[in-house]
Image (cartoon, rainbow, N blue to C red):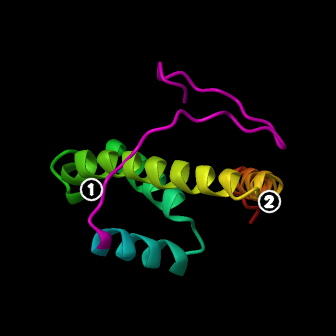
């Protein structure tokens, strides 16, 4: 869905550009998120994004519904961390490696968007 709530189609090999947001965590909170995401084969940003979107859809009287504001704020921190790492890599002359990592991430995202067959 886009910012207006309209569904948008993303074909294989195409990625809809996300808008950047930042989230702040205490270090122990972030470490828990990283570990949880890694155990499930996700990046911390993917986990936070999926968790926040699931919380938005959950009825407000459920735990997920009550956690929605907390999860939404998590997105902001993930953006700040990713932006800092991107700047560090560029300053270290690792622009080529950064573009390669971005390419891998987009490819993985495309693969996750393809429905599994039974």
Q: Which residue is mark 1?
A: 64
14 lies left or right of 62 = right
Q: Image quadrant for the C terminus? A: bottom right
Q: Quadrant of residue 10?
A: top right
Q: Image quadrant for the N terminus? A: top right
Compared to residue 95, the image places residue 33 above or below, namely below
Query: Where does residue 105 sit, x and y in percent of width and height?
Result: 72, 56
61 lies left or right of 100 = left
Query: Where does residue 68 sit, x and y in percent of width and height?
Result: 27, 48
Total numbered labels placed on residues in the image: 2
Near-viewer residue (1 or 26) = 26
In this rendering, which labeled residue sits more in front, label 2 or label 1? 2
Q: Which residues are magenta?
A: 1-27
Circle 2 Cα neighbour tier, 10 Å, few/some/many (<14 / 14–19 / ≥20): few
Disc 2/disc 1 C-alpha distance (Å) = 37 Å
**Prevailing SS of the magenta stretch:** loop
- For the point 62% across and 52% down, the residue is 86
Give the secondary structure at mark 2. Answer: helix
Circle 1 Cα neighbour tier, 10 Å, few/some/many (<14 / 14–19 / ≥20): many
- For the point 15% across and 49% down, the residue is 61
- For the point 40% across and 44% down, the residue is 22
Q: Assess whether residue 23 is covered by the magenta stretch.
A: yes
Compared to residue 57, the image places residue 101 above or below, namely below
Q: Which residue is mark 2?
A: 97
Sooner in the amino-acid sequence: mark 2 or mark 1 = 1
Give the secondary structure at mark 1. Answer: helix
Query: Where does residue 2 sit, x and y in percent of width and height?
Result: 54, 26
């Amino acid at each position: 869905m886009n910012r207006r709530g309209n569904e948008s189609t993303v074909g294989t090999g195409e990625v809809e550009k996300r808008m950047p947001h930042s989230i702040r965590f205490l270090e122990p909170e972030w470490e828990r998120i990283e570990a949880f995401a890694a155990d499930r084969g996700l990046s911390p940003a993917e986990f936070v994004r999926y968790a926040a979107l699931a919380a938005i859809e959950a009825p407000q009287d459920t735990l997920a519904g009550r956690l929605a504001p907390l999860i939404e704020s998590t997105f902001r921190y993930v953006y700040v961390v990713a932006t800092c790492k991107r700047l560090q890599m560029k300053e270290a002359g690792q622009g080529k490696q950064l573009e390669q990592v971005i390419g891998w991430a987009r490819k993985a995202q495309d693969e996750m968007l393809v429905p599994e067959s039974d």
